[in-house]
Image: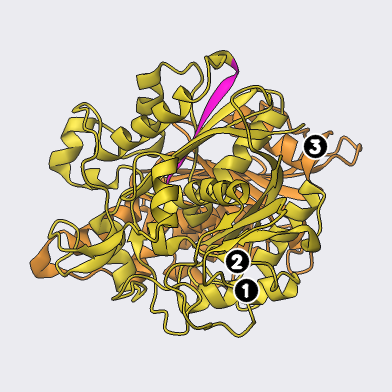
Chain colours: A orange, B yellow
Amino acid sequence: MNLEIISYSSITSHSASSNGETITENLTDAPFAEFSKSIYKKLEVPYPKFFKMDELSKLAFLAGEIVLKEIDTANWNGEKVAIILGNKNSSLSSDQKHYESFKDRDNYFPSPAIFVYTLPNIMMGELCIRHKIKGENSVFIQEKFDAQFLYDYVQHLFEAEAYEYCITGWADYLPNNYEAHLFLIRKSSGEDKHPSFSENFKQLIR
Amino acid sequence: MNIYPVADNIISPMGFDTDQNFNTAMAGGTGIKAIEDNTISPNAFYGAKINNAPELSQFTFLENLFIKSISDGLGQVGGLDMSRTILVVSSTKGNIDLMDAKKAKLFGNRIELHAMAQAISDHFGFRHSPVVVSNACISGVSAMLTAQNLIQMGQYDHAIVTGGDILSEFTVSGFQSLMAISDEPCTPYDANRKGITLGEAVGTILISNNKNTGQPTVEMMGGGQSNDANHISGPSRTGEGLKLAVEKSFKQAGVNASDIDYINAHGTATLYNDEMEAVAFDRLDLLKVPTNSLKGYFGHTLGAAGIIESIMTIKQLVAGQLLVSKGFDELGVTKPLNVVKKQQALVNARLALKTVSGFGGCNAAIIFKKL
C-alpha cells in the first residue's frame, strides 16, 4: 500500500517548524517552559489544559497542533486514526520530579498531578483527547529514532487494519535536550502532491 | 498466518514457573500479603513482593527476574533459529529503583528501558536489538500484539515476549497519592472494593508461526488496541474505548461475542475501572460469559499484567477449569457481570478473551483459541 506524508512538524530547543518552514525560533535560548509557552501563543490554541501537562506531553501536544493544523479533527473518524511514536527517555523528567517528592521522609509530598505523567504513553493520551483519536497508540522506547522500525510498523498497521491516518515519529524530552518530529501519514491519493512515506521519512527533518 | 504461544513462564510471589503459579492459585493461594518495608512505604500496605530472587551481581533485581523468566521459556523449546527471533520487552517503569543515584552508579544508563532491554538481550547473545513497548498497564498485551505484527510482517518467525515491573516506592507512593490503593487485598468487582493492590512479577511468552516449535495448546487469534480519548487517568464512563478494542479483536480473530467462552478481564478493583468494564461488556453482549480478574492473586503487576494474565488465561482454557475471581463476594457494578465466584469447570470451551485498560486512556484485547 502506498502511503504519503501529508504534513510534518518539528520542535527542538532552537525552533518550531511546519513542513520544513520555520514558525518560530528560540533566539534567546529560553528554557523549555518559556519556549513552549511562546509556541503555544504563536499557534493561538485555546486549550488551557496545556498548562497542566508535563514537558513531554506539552512537546508532543504542540508538535501535534502543528502537524494537524489543516485537519478538522473535531469531525474526523477518530477510530480510524493511530499514533505510533518512538521515544528514548520515557517520562524521566516527570519521574525525577515524582522521585524528589518521596525520597525524603521528612519532606514527603507525592502529587497525583505529577505522578499521572510518569508514563511515556500519556503524551499520546493527551493527543487523543485533544484530537478525538481512538485508534491504537503505542510508544516504542528506542536508543535513537529508528525510522526503519516505525516505517515497517506503520506500513503494516495500514495493511492489517483499516486505518485512514496515522501520526508517527519521535518525541523525547530531557530538560536541555528535547525534540519532537511528527508526521501525519495517509493512504496515498496518487496525486504526487505529498512526499511518499518511505523508510527514509526522517530525512525530511532539517 | 497462524501464530501459537509455544512456551511460557511466570515469576511472582506464588512461584518461579507457570505451573507453580497456576497450581498455587488453583489451591486458593495468593501472592498478596501485608508488607512492612520502609524502603517501599513508610506505612504497612498490601502488595505482592517476590522474595528469594536470583541475583547475578552485574544485573538489577528486575533484570535478574527477566533473565530467569526468559531462560525458563527458552528451555521449553529446542534451539530456536535466533536469526529469525525477536525479543519484545514490556515494562512501565523498568529499573525505576535506579532513580537512587547510589544504585544507578552500578548499572550505567539502565534506568532507560532500551538500555535495560539491551543488557538482557546481550546476556543471551540475541542477534537483533530488542523492541521495547511502554503503553502503561496495557503494555503486556501491546507487546504480544507487536510481536504478532512483527512475525506477520515476515521479519521474524518467533518472538520472545517478556514483561515485568517491580514493586517500588515510586509506584506505591504515586498510587497512594491518587488514593487508589486498597487498605485490604484488592477485591475486583466486589461491592466493597477499595482500590488496587500493587504486585511484582515477570512473565514470558514465546510465540511462533511454526506449530512444531514446542507443543502449543492454543492459537493466538489476534487482538485490537484503542484509546478512550477521554481522560489521562480516569476510565471512560461509557466503556467506548474498551468496546472498540474488543470489537477489533473479534474482527481480527473472525469471531463474534457469542463465540467467547471465557473472559479474563482487567479488574483492578478501582470503583471506576471495574464499572467501566461492566458497561463495556454489557454493550458488547458479553455479560453472560464467565469472567474473572486475577489481580487478587498477583496484584496489579503493570507491565507484566497482560502477559502473565494471558498465560493464566491459556492455562485455564486448556485445563477446563476457571479460577475464582479472588476477593469477589457481592456484585458491585451496575451490570450483571458473570463473575466467577466458585471454582468452575469450563466445558467444551474454545475461545477466551483477555482485556486490559490503562492510564493514558488505552485499551487492548487479545483472543486465544484452544487447539
Q: Estimate the x, y position of residue B76 in percent, counting from the top left.
A: 49, 25
Task: Tell me if A152 is positioned left or right of B315 in this view.
Answer: right
Using the rendered image of the protein, determine whether residue A163 is visible from the camera's viewpoint: no
**In the depicted view, which residue is nearer to us: B267 or B247?**
B267
User: Which disc, if any, is residue A206?
Assistant: none
Using the rendered image of the protein, determine whether residue A146 is visible from the camera's viewpoint: yes
Marks 2 and 3, Cα distance to the nearest angstrom? 41 Å
Task: Tell me if B324 is positioned left or right of A23 in this view.
Answer: left
Count of numbered marks: 3
Q: Secondary structure at mark 2?
A: strand
What residue does disc 3 label? A3
What residue does disc 2 label? B291
- Image quadrant of residue A19? top right
Q: Which residue is at 65% across, 65% downward? A: B242
**In the depicted view, which residue is nearer to us: B202 or B371?**
B371
In this rendering, do the residues under marks 1 and 2 share a single chain?
yes
Marks 1 and 3, Cα distance to the nearest angstrom? 45 Å
Q: Which residue is at 20% across, 59% downward? A: A100
Q: Range of the magenta residues?
A: B84-91
Q: Secondary structure at mark 1?
A: loop
